[in-house]
Image: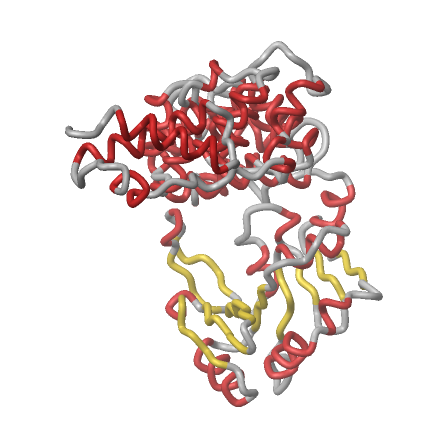
Amino acid sequence: MTEVRIAEAAWLREPLLSKLLSALDRGGEEARVVGGAVRNALMGEQVGEIDVATTALPDEVVRRVQGAGFRAVPTGIEHGTVTVVAEGRSFEVTTLRKDVETFGRHAKVAFGRDWTVDAERRDFTMNALSMSPDGRVHDPIGGIDDLKARRVRFIGDASRRIAEDYLRILRFFRFHAAYGEGEPDADGLAACIAGRAGLDQLSRERIRMELLKLAVARHAVPAAAVMTEAGLLIRVLGGVPDLAGFSNMTKVEAEIGTAADPVRRLGALGARISEDAIRLWQRLRLSNAEHDRLAYMVKDWWRVSPGDDKAARALLYGLGPERFTDRVLLAWSRSAAGTGDAAWHELATLPQRWTAPVFPLKADDFMKRGVKKGPALGETLRAAEAQWIGADFPSDAAAIAAIADAAAVSNIGK
């Protein structure tokens, strides 16, 4: 077993975590931080969620943490997991386990006290590390060497790990995109290809979660290319991926300084027309809001081009900043222009320079001009707004009054 020590880990000294570990790491029981927090700390990445493993049985975990002033929520207590909550923070605490039977997410487990056996249950070597409260990192299966090599490697037999949960195929590529370098591990890739039919057994929600995380990972583009070559991505999306558009989307996002967005990147990868947005919505069980974004994103994207400032302002007014950015970046990513194109950059950054005004006319303005309540009033409002937009959003009172007069005259008596 490899063992190293992290000399300075400020997050490990955080009072709530220290208090939790102190409650669990005593009286004949041991507790360690496990998984992603340890991996990220060793790689110099930001530490986010913190999970803890312990030799203490779940009932003992509850007794100890409640005695220390925490709230214990039995989120998965039958599988050994208790969520510990205090001051708006939460930590998942799980008793060491060993597999009795393995069949996907619903493996039958027994509680144990062997840290190596527990580590061997995990998916990748870099996720099987654990850290004692004093900063010692325990590595029973070679995870540190793989971290140094930026290599995502399954624990033990890759095909067996995948058969336990086919979501691990997507996790393999997602972790490689986030933490790996170079080509994916050959044994892992071969096992993913051999087991790809198992993706059809997964819930759409789980696939959605992994795919959206993969889309914004650091090396998402080469990972998506390998997945496409391996026949995996077309199986997930139900359509041919647009790798060039996906790659360009990552570049134009960076060019205008906007954050990587998973839904926008999904649109670039898999949607060209409204039917594609519907297919992705159903296939990945996207939320209604995510589907709406895709639908607005792909609608008439081919009509968008730089150079007409008036048309750009009208589009921004109609769509709002988020949908405008989605559609413009999609059009840019599929255009012949390069990332450094000044005209496209100007168009894409319009929301940073111009805020759409509020339509200055109300129903009362037209009723005063003789338009009656009912369908005619709504039609008049819409016609006036269209004229105001066509005039490039005038703000002076005389121009606005003229627009109101013209719209009212055409609808009086209807």
Number of marks present in the image shown: 0
- In the rendering, at what x and y percent does residue 109 appear? 42, 61
Residue 312 image-quadrant placement:
top right
User: Can you name the residue that lies furthest to the right here?
Assistant: 7
Q: Is residue 412 above or below residue 154?
A: above
Apparent side of residue 309 relative to residue 162 in the rendered image (left or right): right
Residue 174 image-quadrant placement:
top right
- In the rendering, at what x and y percent does residue 205 appear? 37, 43
Image quadrant in which the C terminus is located: top left
Q: Is residue 377 above or below residue 22?
A: above
Q: Is residue 79 above or below residue 244?
A: below
Residue 29 image-quadrant placement:
bottom right
Apparent side of residue 319 relative to residue 409 in the rendered image (left or right): right
Nearest the camera: 133 or 242?
242
Tell me if residue 62 can be seen: yes
Write the residue at 77% across / 60% down. 3
Write the residue at 41% across / 34% down. 401
